[in-house]
Image: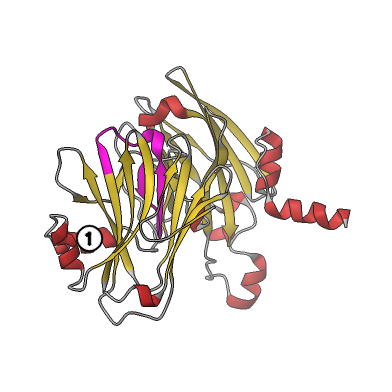
Amino acid sequence: MSKLVIGENIVISSLAAYRLQLSLGEWDWGCLLFNKGAAPIHFKEAPGLVINDKALLIHGADIEDDFEKLLVYINIDNKKPNQTINAQLTELLSGSITASMQFSNDELPQSAFVLLELYRHKEQLKLRCIGQGFAQGISKLFASYGVTEASVHKEAMSSTSAKSVTVSNTQLDDILVNMHWDTKQSSVHHGANLFVGENFKPMTDLRVGCLYELHNGQRGLVQTIGEDLLGSFHGVPYVEALRSENSHVEQLAINAKYQHKLHRYLIYALMAEGHNNWSALNVEIEFQLAQSQKRCFSPDTLMMKPIYAVAMLEFEQGEITITALNEYFENLPELDQAYGWGLAWRYQNQSENEEQE
């Protein structure tokens, strides 16, 4: 691991995928994107680059040829807190830390800073620690790079907040998996009826997710539980999990533009809380494949198992195959084992170590 100081840089592999995780406290942050022959813009997402909460996901193989650099900046409107700013670059497949950067409060006297820079140099991608401050604030930072619309900055900031993502329409060529559900009147827990009456309606929480495998062999999990498991639409693994808390809607969006990199996606639904059987819910999971009709699936079991394996999506030679599964499991490691995915499950390893001791 390299611990970068101001002015230092490292080369990052264009064949690997990375997460640049930021620990900023009360600071806001954003990015400016520079492409050849174009004015700099406030960045939200682009091929190979995407913001996901307080992290920037990077996949060099998908970054377009006209890319020059991406600046990560921070700013704060009120009094600066006494805290340390940290940035850590992690290689996603191995989980190893490639580089880290740290800025103390003494090093951040200004209210706006260019923190670091991802740039292309002689066909290589490099990450550089900058640490350049602007005493006149964010407006001066923007002006120094030819960006003048501070109001756009505020809009860009909203994409980095930790709020729940609202499900929205995606391009027609994308592959969408939408899950809808509601509660049957008769589905109230009998135990709850004894204490709160028949009109009690428990809160239901279903989630959708997938096990994925890319053609290069990379495997993993994407689901709407866990901020670090939401995936990436424009970068590895080319699937993003979205949810709407108030309308009982969950969605997986798969980027069909990268179909040549996709191999298979095992779609599942997870009963997180509120019920103990699938018959208590009207669940419908709708698949909208590129240039094909919709297909819908619903669980049809009375078994009290919380994992519903819905279908397998497979991508081969420009064709998409969908295979219904309709199987049920107690937990995700059991699902993994049934289909031979081979992911590392942390608590299983801990149990094995305890047994050996």
SS of the residue under disc 1 = helix
Kindly give the residue lying farthest to the top in the view shown.
317
Q: Residue furthest front?
A: 7
Viewer-side residue, 12 vs 24: 12
Identify the residue shown where x is 35% and y is 63%: 161
The percent position of residue 347, horizontal first and vertical second, equals 71, 55
Q: Amino acid at mark 1?
A: Glu
Residue 230 visible at all? yes
- Compare residues 53 and 295 and report the one nearer the observer: 53
Q: Is residue 154 above or below residue 285?
A: below
Residue extent of the magenta highlight: 48-68
- Crowd rating for badge 1 (residues with CA inside 10 Å; few <14, some 14–19, many 20+): few
* Residue 224 appears in the figure: no
Q: Name the residue nearer the viewer: 271 or 185.
A: 271
| Residue at the spot 38% in from the left edge and 49% down from the top edge | 127
- Quadrant, the C terminus: bottom right
Q: Residue at x 65, y 47 (%)?
A: 332
Percent coordinates x, y for residue 73 in the rendering: 29, 61
Say left or right for 126 vs 339: left
Where is residue 295? Give x, y as percent.
45, 31
34 falls in the magenta region? no
Position of 98 with respect to 144 (left or right) is right
Please state if 98 lies on the left or on the right of 106 as rendered: right
Q: Position of residue 130 (x, y in %)?
A: 33, 59
Determine whether 288 is above or below 321 in the image. Answer: below
Res 4 quadrant in image: bottom left
Give the labeled residue for mark 1. 155
Quarter of the image holding residue 261?
Answer: top left
Report the number of numbered marks: 1
The residue under the point 39% across, 57% down is 247
